[in-house]
Image (cartoon, rainbow, N blue to C red):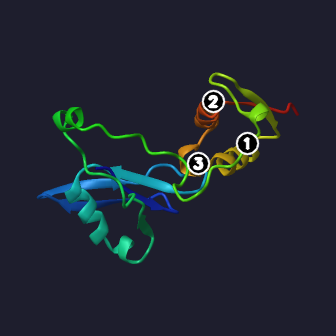
């Protein structure tokens, strides 16, 4: 399991975990103005949670609550799990006229002013979390999965 912590500031400090002193360094701020630290070591995560900066609210844990624990390769081979859908189960499917239904491999080309506008509209339309499309390359990949090719207007 990956433990994620976020801060509005770029921080670095030392924590003691498992009898070792470790340097915790939050990376450069991303487009949302947030510095992120990730670890897969549970002891380090507990040490960061105990740090005074976390208690004061400067550092927030952003680990998904529903993230499954890691599964061994043998267990993965034995279990078959359906991929989760991107749409909530409670939302009924919109009725689309028969002539508007896209066939497999059919793409639609859309033009946007800039990356920010494209990201807002694509995320809103397809119900995608903005954290998944942090850069133009990721946005193009996600849009392509949904049959959309993004073009930007020239200045």
Relative placement, left or right, of 126 versus 69 is: right
Q: Residue at x 63, y 34 (%)?
A: 146
The quadrant in which the C terminus is found is top right
Q: Residue at x 28, y 50 (%)?
A: 1
Where does the image place residue 145, in percent across and percent down from the top left? Answer: 59, 32
Tag 2 and tag 3, C-beta contact below 8 Å: no
* Circle 2 SS class: helix
* Circle 1 SS class: loop
Of mark 1 and mark 2, the one earlier in the sequence is: 1
Q: Nearer the viewer, residue 151 or 20?
A: 151
Name the mark on residue 113.
Answer: none
Of mark 3 and mark 1, the one earlier in the sequence is: 1
According to the picture, the residue beneath numbered tag 2 turns out to be 144
Nearer the observer: mark 1 or 2; the answer is 1
Q: Residue furthest front?
A: 98
According to the picture, the residue beneath numbered tag 3 turns out to be 128
| Quadrant in which residue 84 is drawn | top left
According to the picture, the residue beneath numbered tag 1 turns out to be 96
Tag 1 and tag 2, C-beta contact below 8 Å: no
In the displayed structure, 117 sits above or below 90; it is: above
């Amino acid at each position: 399991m990956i433990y994620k912590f976020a801060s509005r500031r770029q921080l670095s400090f030392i924590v003691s975990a498992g009898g070792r002193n470790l340097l915790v360094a939050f990376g450069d701020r991303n487009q949302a103005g947030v510095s992120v630290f990730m670890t897969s070591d549970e002891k380090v995560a507990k040490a960061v949670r105990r740090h005074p900066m976390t208690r004061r609210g400067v550092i927030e844990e952003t680990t998904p609550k529903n993230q499954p624990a890691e599964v061994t390769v043998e267990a993965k081979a034995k279990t078959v799990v359906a991929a989760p859908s991107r749409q909530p189960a409670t939302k009924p499917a919109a009725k689309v006229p028969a002539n508007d239904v896209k066939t497999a491999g059919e793409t639609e080309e859309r033009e946007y002013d800039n990356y920010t506008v494209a990201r807002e509209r694509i995320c809103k339309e397809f119900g995608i979390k903005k954290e998944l499309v942090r850069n133009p390359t990721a946005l193009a990949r996600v849009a392509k999965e949904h049959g959309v090719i993004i073009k930007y207007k020239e200045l």
